[in-house]
Amino acid sequence: MDAYFILYEEARKTSPPTHQLRPEIRDESWALHCAHIRAGRYISLSGPEPTEVFPDPSWSETSAALDHEMRFIEENLKHPAYCVLNLCRIIYSFREREVVISKRFGGHWASARFPQWAPLIQAAIRSYEGTGMPGDEEFLEGKVRRFLEFAAERIREARNP
């Protein structure tokens, strides 16, 4: 679950808001978060209807947020299960132009679509769900960089069909 503290005026904008408690943080995945909220993926505690507050992101804004996710993954390969599943989600998002999916869904989709990577993706799903098997973590660590390269190529193809 993600939680953010931003001002109402900032939430209505399409530009990434600044975190109010930690101003050095800017939500570069804002378009993705807005898309999830507008699709009903939220829990509202009080206040106005979130779909009336958060903007509908353009594909350009969404694509920029997905690019940010890619950069984050490239810098954080030390978390291979997260990286593999988020890469699956990003490939799906670029191919289908649909970002409102879970890492689990992306993983299952990619396992079926790219069977050569199914063992790695299944290890990532197990690890992410806390049901990892002996050897999964080492397997993930050893293959995550190659999967990143594979994913980057699939994303390039999706951008330029």
Image (cartoon, rainbow, N blue to C red):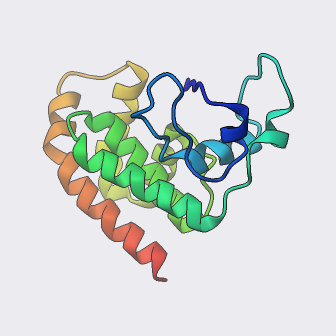
Residue at 41% over, 59% down: 67
Q: Is residue 75 above or below residue 43?
A: below
Q: Is residue 63 above or below residue 111?
A: below
14 left or right, relative to 149: right
| Residue that protrudes farthest toward the bottom in the picture | 161
Image quadrant for the N terminus? top right
Q: Is residue 70 above or below residue 7?
A: below
Question: Residue 55 or 134: which is nearer the viewer?
Answer: 55
Residue at 22% over, 41% down: 77
Q: Position of residue 110 (x, y in %)?
A: 45, 53
55 left or right, relative to 30: right
Q: Position of residue 116 (x, y in %)?
A: 30, 57
Question: Residue 61 or 86: which is nearer the viewer?
Answer: 61
Question: Residue 23 or 31: which is nearer the viewer?
Answer: 23
Residue 112 appearing in the image:
no
Determine which quarter of the picture holds residue 91. bottom left
Residue at 19% over, 56% down: 146
Number of callouts in the render? 0
Q: Is residue 115 above or below residue 154?
A: above
71 left or right, relative to 68: left
Determine which quarter of the picture holds residue 24. top left
Residue 122 appearing in the image:
yes
Determine which quarter of the picture holds residue 46. top right
Q: Position of residue 160 (x, y in %)?
A: 46, 82
Residue at 56% over, 41% down: 17
Q: Position of residue 13 (x, y in %)?
A: 68, 49
